[in-house]
Each structure stands twice: as C-alpha cells, then as structure tokens.
Amino acid sequence: MTTGNPSYTSPKPCKHLADYKLSHGLSGYNYLQKYLKTTPPGRTSVEKPDIKIPRCISCDGIQGRLYFCLICSSVSCLDHTLLHTQSENGHDVAVDIERAELYCCVCCDQVYDPDFDRAVMSKQIMGIPRGKNGDESIGERLVKRRRLGSGLGQELVDLKISKHLISLRDRRAKSCYPLGLRGLNNLGSTCFMNSVLQALLHAPPFRNYFLSEGHNQENCRKRSVDRLCLACDIDVIFSAAFSGDRAPYSPAQFLYSWWQHSANLASNEQQDAHEFFISVLDGIHEKEGKSRNQSRDNGDCQCIAHRVFSGLLRSDVTCMTCGFTSTTFDPCVDVSLDLDTSNFPPTNIANKPIKPDGNSSMSTLLGCLDLFTRQEKLGSDPKLYCQNCQERRDSVKQMSIKRLPLVLCLHIKRFEHSSVRRMSRKIDRYLHFPFSLDMTPYLSSSIVRNRFGNRIFAFEGDESDISTEFEIFAVVTHAGTLESGHYVTYLRLRNQWYKCDDAWINEVDEAMVRASQCYMMFYVQKMLYHKANEDLSYLPISPLRDTFIPIPGCC
C-alpha cells in the first residue's frame, strides 16, 4: 500500500480566498445557501428564483461557464468575470453556478475550502424531501436503513421483512438489469473515477462488507467536522447504487473526500485510473486501520482494503557465480504486467506501427504473466552485492506470487516512456484474456519447484490449500491517446456483460469486451463469484437489514 497524504488535510486555500474570508467570514457562504438547488441525482447548482435562464450581466450570453460573484451577486461569463475582478477591488472569489464550486478569478483556477463544502452539504441535507409522515427524511432513513427495531414486536418485524423480501425479489426478477447496476454522472473529466468505482461496487467481498454494516457511518469515530471519511462516502455510494433507483448518481461527496486525501491530484483534469485505484485503497486503509486491530499475528492488516485486495509477492535474486539466493516479500494490492513486446510490429519514424502479419499484434494475459515470472538478468551498472561471495556479482531476478488475494487486480502497463527518444506513447495493443484464470503456475511454490526441476518436494508455506481459480467480473478499458482518452468499465454479472460508460449502461456481448483495450482486470476467486451469482438480490439478507425498494422500470 502506498503512503498517502499523512496529514490528510484539505488543500490550502489560495491567498485571495484567505483574504476574502478574513474580510467577510462565512457571510457570503451563508447568503449563497438560499440560491443553492440540489437535483435528485445529487448535483448542486446556483439558481436565482427570479431568473429562469442565467445570463452574463455584461454580454447577455448563456454559453459556457457562468460565475456568481460572492461580493455583489452579479453573474458573468468567464471573460467578463475576469474583467469584473480587475475593475472591482476585492471581487476576487466567485462560484461556478453550474457546479457550485469556488473559483478564484485572480488565480484563474478552482479553489477548495472545507467551510464552503460544509455549506453546500448542509444545504443538500436540508433540501432532502421529507417522508410521507413528515418526521423523517429519506437521508435519515438511508443512515438508519439497517436499524429495523428490536425487542417487543421483533417477530412481527421479521415476518414483515420476509414477505417484503419475497415481493422485492419478484420485482427484481422483472428488472432489465441486476440490482446495483447504476450509472455514475461525469463531474468533469471523472471517467477515471467512475470506471474504478463500478469495479469496486461489484467486487463481491468488498460489496458484501459495505452492504452488511461493515463500515457504520454513525459509529465511525474517526469522522469530524474538519475531515471527511473516504470509507463513509463509499458506504453512501453503495447505498445509492443498491437503492433500486436507476437514475444516474453523482458521487460529488466522494470526489471531495478523495481530493482531501490526495491533494496533489485535486483538479478537474483527467487522472490515471490505476493511480486512483491505489489512492482509494490507501485512503480506506488509512482510516479503517486505526479503528481496527492493526494486524493479525502474521502481520496482515485487517482493513477491508487489504482483506480483499492484498496479496504477497516473492522476489528471488540469485548470484550467477555461487548460486546464493536472496528472497524478499512485498505486499501488493495489484500486479502490474508488461505487455510482451518481443513480437511487436516495427514502427516508422512517426512512431506509428506498420501493419503486422497474422496475429503478431496480439498479446495474451497468460503471456504477460509468464513474462512477469520469467527470470531476468539484472544490469551490471552497478552489480548487486552477494552476501555469500562478499562482493558484487552478476545476478538474475525472478518474481512469483506467494499469496493470492480474494480479488486479483491485474494492471496492464500501456504507457511506455523512452529516455532515448525522449518521448512517451500509449501501446495500442490488444490483449487476449481468459474469463476463467488458473493462477497455479505463477505461485511461488510452482516457480521454485520448476527452477529446481521439481526436486523440492516439501515447500515452506505450501499454497495447496489456497484457491487458485479465478473468474473475471470487471474490465476497465482505456480508449484514446496518452494525452487524452476515456475510461469505460465492462461488468460481468450473472454471466452477462454490461458496459458502464459514466451515466450510460448498456448490455453488450463478450466480443465487444474482448475487442476493447483492457487497462485493468479484476478477477475474484471462483467460489466467491458463483456464490454471488446465486443470490438474485445481490444482497446479504438479514432480518436486521432494511433492503431498499427498487423503483419500477429499468432506467
């Protein structure tokens, strides 16, 4: 697990925002609240009740971004917002009316302030519609969805729940898509986030943890008014995805929390999906690791991120002179694989591949795994120090997998950087991958036995009792170039593939999945995959859990 932001604080506000708050405090935020409007998917915008269509006060334009000045409440397009700042002293901070986000007109960049986020979120909470009885909001019912009551009348409650579950299951059977399959709105170059979230939402052990009160928001002792909890906001996304509502959901709250955890990545620019995946697991580990026992007797972390995704890699470095082997073990939450470029088609001066013959442009996942576990001669500048020879020697290195996780994430290195050519490129090479994967040949026990001609009959820590058969359930793909591209996730649910392209979800065949350029592949142990498919509701049924009533219809 990579080391995240140790302070876990919000990005520091810019000087102009600090000057504004010093002069005006939170009065501007409080005044703005009456103009905030939250739509059902969860997106907040700024709307004046007396203006149906917002226009720039200077050019009367309605195209592009419009900004609300926190000092004089004027609305301007981007160009006139900058001119407004130059002509009016102190009018430096505005709000993007479409997204309700702070914008510094001097820095010409989006800025972040926890106080502003709290003002927006409190408005969202106040704006949630009330229930029929008027005494409990939908939001409150979501928070208390698992608390159905206890003590007197419990048997009647259980009977009511049983009848409800039967009715609920019948209604789900008539639905086009499985429960939990819900689009995610793009919040501005956030397809990298949506693609990974879809994979996490449908990782069986990870999903079951959050849907069975594994992380209780009410009991999360780490949450405070100054810091957001990434795990709590993931729990909210699970509640929304499995609510039965088919309307696309906006994970804005989660995006804010992730920005706080990864301040260096907080921007409206496209990010790398693999880097985001590592960052999210790191954020969950950082928060949950403090509230649970740090590790078992063997040192394994017990946070849900590590319990589901963590494996153990073995690295053997062997001296080519004396044969002495130095072994190290490293925990991992994914395995990064190089594409086998040995039979890549040649490239011309423009770095465009020449048309290949036959299947020379096709790689296989098994070939990538073979390449990962193949012996590699290390460079001689400098040579590694051999403890047995007591001097530097030529050596070979071989990787293997000591322990497999419940969910295996395989990352394909598609972005190549050449120090000689001083350029970077994306490898647009298609990868053939199996839906069922046997990892036995890549375990440390198999690799070491093969190295010594199967003469080692007893292997320390033999993995014979570990499940090595996996089934694929999610594929994150990348289309486009190194500079610009788009992420899409394909989900395999009940042996049917679904394409999740931000807010859009479509049923597709496996040929489309195989034709895509996979970037990340998620496999789960076969037993867990089939167990997940047996339950049509996709939920761990418990008499103490209030399952959601799905909205009729597919979309």
Image: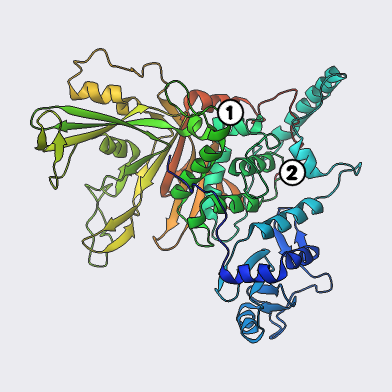
Q: What SS does tag 1 mark?
A: helix
The residue located at (44%, 47%) in the rendering is 274
In terms of sequence position, does the residue under pointer 2 or pointer 1 come before the other?
1
Q: x and y percent of residue 2 in the render?
A: 42, 43
Q: Residue placed at 80% from the left, 28% from the top?
A: 148
Q: Position of residue 25 (x, y in %)?
A: 71, 66
Q: Which quadrant is the N terminus positioned in?
A: top left
Query: Does residue 12 appear in this view?
Result: yes
Residue farthest front in this picture: 22
Residue 183: x and y in percent read 63, 49
Residue that appears at 59% across and 34% down: 207
- What residue is disc 1 on? 533
Name the secondary structure under disc 2.
Answer: loop
Q: Nearer the viewer, mark 2 or mark 1?
A: 1
Q: Nearer the viewer, residue 512 or 491?
A: 491
Q: Which residue is mark 2?
A: 553
At a point 47% along the width and 43% down the height, the residue shown is 475
Which residue sits furthest right?
133
